Amino acid sequence: MQTHLYTHDLPEDIDWGGSVAIDTETMGLQHHRDRLCLVQLSAGDGHCHLVHFPEPCFGQSPHLCKLLANDHLEKVFHYGRFDLAVLAKSFGIVPHNVYCTKIASRLTRTYTDRHSLKSLCADLLGIDVDKREQTSDWGGEVLSPEQLRYAGTDVLYLHAIKEKLDALLVRENRLALAQACFRFLPHRAELDLLAGEGFDIFAHK
Ligand code: MN
């Protein structure tokens, strides 16, 4: 893995192909409370591009915003529901044309409840990833080498995982249902920002 670290924005000239894997690191899991600290991106080519926000200043990212707003570019997440809400809140852009490996896993690997990124890396790729930095402090002015390696790893394997899950979606005849869920996901993220994750529009009461 090669990691490339930037502050506030990506360089303009990165070729993502047709599909970019994206993850975020924040100060915590509450959208109204916890700010975005890092956005990780990879084209699935072994390079991980890390955009660092040492302070909550999200108006200096024109190239990242252009990417997020590009509906022709597929964006692959793991539990995209969270990342989409964070990105929408920070940049005012709700990304569309998204894929979520957690949703694809839940729709196909119904024999297990192991749907974490670590589990998908282990079960689908035979790769053991180290998640120790997951709960570290991402708000610092300087991120540690361990944090940068961890952050890159979170997007490094998403394309390979997606390929495995796509085959399972076809095999189990759930591709169309998955695609419908992916189309709804940006709106689910908007609902989370509107009224919190407990706001379930599908619930009876
Ligand atoms: Mn992550």
Image (tube, rainbow, N blue to C red):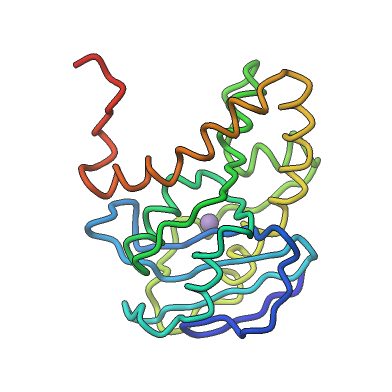
Quadrant placement of the C terminus: top left
Residue 102 drawn at (x, y percent)? 57, 37
Residue 152 drawn at (x, y percent)? 64, 65
Most foreground residue, 145 or 70? 70
Task: Report the residue at 29% width, 39% height from top.
Answer: 197
Q: Quadrant of residue 116?
A: top right
Task: Report the residue at 45% width, 41% height from top.
Answer: 185
Most foreground residue, 8 or 176? 176
Would you place residue 9 above or below residue 89 in this image? below
Quadrant placement of the N terminus: bottom right
Q: Quadrant of residue 180?
A: top right
Task: Report the residue at 77% width, 48% height from top.
Answer: 160
Residue 154 drawn at (x, y percent)? 62, 57
Most foreground residue, 201 or 33? 201
Q: Is residue 27 left or right of residue 178?
A: left
Task: Report the residue at 66% width, 80% height from top.
Answer: 4
Residue at the front extreme, as displayed: 72
Labels in figure, total: 0
Would you place residue 77 above or below residue 57 in this image? above
Residue 14 drawn at (x, y percent)? 70, 78
Most foreground residue, 132 or 164? 164
Would you place residue 72 above or below residue 205 in this image? below
